[in-house]
Amino acid sequence: MKGRDLTELAARNLREAILRNSLTTLGVAVGVASLVAMLSLGVGLQTLASQRLNKSGLFDAVFVTSRRGMRGIGGPPQQQPKPAKVEGAKPLDQTAKQEFEKLPNVTEVYPQVRFLTEVRYAGNSYSANVLGLPESSRSTGAFDGITGKYFSSPTADEAILHADFAKELSPQVATLVGKDLVLRYAARQQKSTQDIAAEKDIDKQLDDMMSGGISIVSREKKLRIAGIIESDPSAGIAGFGGGRVFLPLRVAEELHPAQPNDVQEFVRAGGSSKAAYAALTVRAKSPKDVLKIEDAIKNMGFMTFSLLDATRSLRLVFTVFDLFLGLFGSLALTVASLGIINTLVMAILERRREIGVLKALGATDGDVRSLFFAEAGAMGLLGGVFGVALGWLIGQALTWGTTLYLRRQDLPGVKISYVPWWLALSAVAFAVVVSLIAGLYPAGRAARLNPVEALRYE
């Protein structure tokens, strides 16, 4: 029997018992829809988590500190496994920063500038922790719901306040945008050799010479409030959280604030006035480049840390989650396959005479088997296509309901369901395969039917 004849005959048989075949196909569609809806939920949640985490900038970053004095609490210095040919411990200074910038696949290197300050606003004083933010932080999700705006430029004398701190300044936080405040902080001042020589006080001149010309002085900086944010962009391994006032990184560096490691580095350097960073963040083009960058920095003699291990654990959790969702979704499709078996077995009883005529006209057992397989495959294909569409609609309804609930809670909406092309094609293929398997018994039974007995059947 030719393929064209087989297709036409199968389509005619499906049309003759349209109600029963439609209900069977609908059962397959419902099974596929449940499978697609559950898996799309797992894929959507995984995509949402990955996008948010990647957007946070934590998984494409390497956090670098000096090997000098890396001690645990009450314990000996912590040691990382030494790679081959590790150089001696070096200061984390401007020279090291320039070396990191030359590494392949590095997009930017910036220091963590953090310092305590006294904020003066409306005649009152408040203690706050200040953090400098690089220009790349603009793309993080921390500023999605900002009241006001982000920094107008990397050198703007502007500040962004955390909402909790803004509430201390004024109950109406929105009114703070555009107002001025003053930072009073401890600055690190470097005196030149000429300035030291010009000192009239011999004792002071000797102190300056012994300290390398470094002194800590009180400074003030007037800033305009650009915006208020609810989330903390300094949270996580990069900044350890707790930031209350945020400045453009270049502005924070130009203030030359005294850092906790200044005195420590000065003592280790034997009076050197060369400034060193407490930590540097090295940004990679992609998370896949992080390991190579880490190895290169370790070979330079520095300590490194990244969150790739957390990423692997996260992927494992979502893989197991998707597996269980797929198993539960497959149960409905398995139940639907029983409907296919029932429909085709009933078709054999109703079409015994037709099968006998086909065999009497020369149809082989393989032709009869192929006919029933074609009918089962057609129901699986149609059910799979409609099931994917129905599963997508269910996912959209879940996303709509979740977004509506979140907006009532004053939270931004999210897309929790996602149907990629591979999931749609796999669901349709799975429906066809299950339908063909379900048609094995009816097709075999029809093929074994004796044509003489079939023609006698009334």
Image: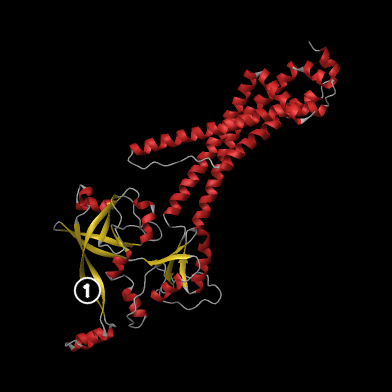
Q: Is residue 145 above or below residue 402?
A: below
Look at mark 1 in the image and give the residue it sits on: 217
Dot 1 lies on which element?
A: strand
Where does the image place residue 365, in percent across and percent down from the top left?
Answer: 82, 27
Where does the image place residue 249, in percent across and percent down from the top left?
Answer: 32, 64
The residue at the point 68 percent across, 18 percent down is 16
Which quadrant holds residue 342? top right
**Which quadrant: the N terminus?**
top right
In screen coordinates, is 281 left or right of 195? right
- Label 1, residues with CA under 10 Å away: few <14, some 14-19, many ≥20: few
Residue 351 visible, this orientation: yes
Which quadrant holds residue 282? bottom left
Residue 257 visible, this orientation: no
The colour scheme is secondary structure
The residue at the point 49 percent across, 35 percent down is 395
**Which quadrant: the C terminus?**
top right
Q: Is residue 284 above or below residue 411?
A: below
Q: Is residue 78 above or below residue 348?
A: below
Q: Residue furthest front?
A: 4
Which quadrant holds residue 92? bottom left
The residue at the point 52 percent across, 43 percent down is 43
- The front one of 429 and 326 is 429
Where does the image place residue 204, in percent across and percent down from the top left?
Answer: 20, 85
In screen coordinates, is 336 left or right of 286? right
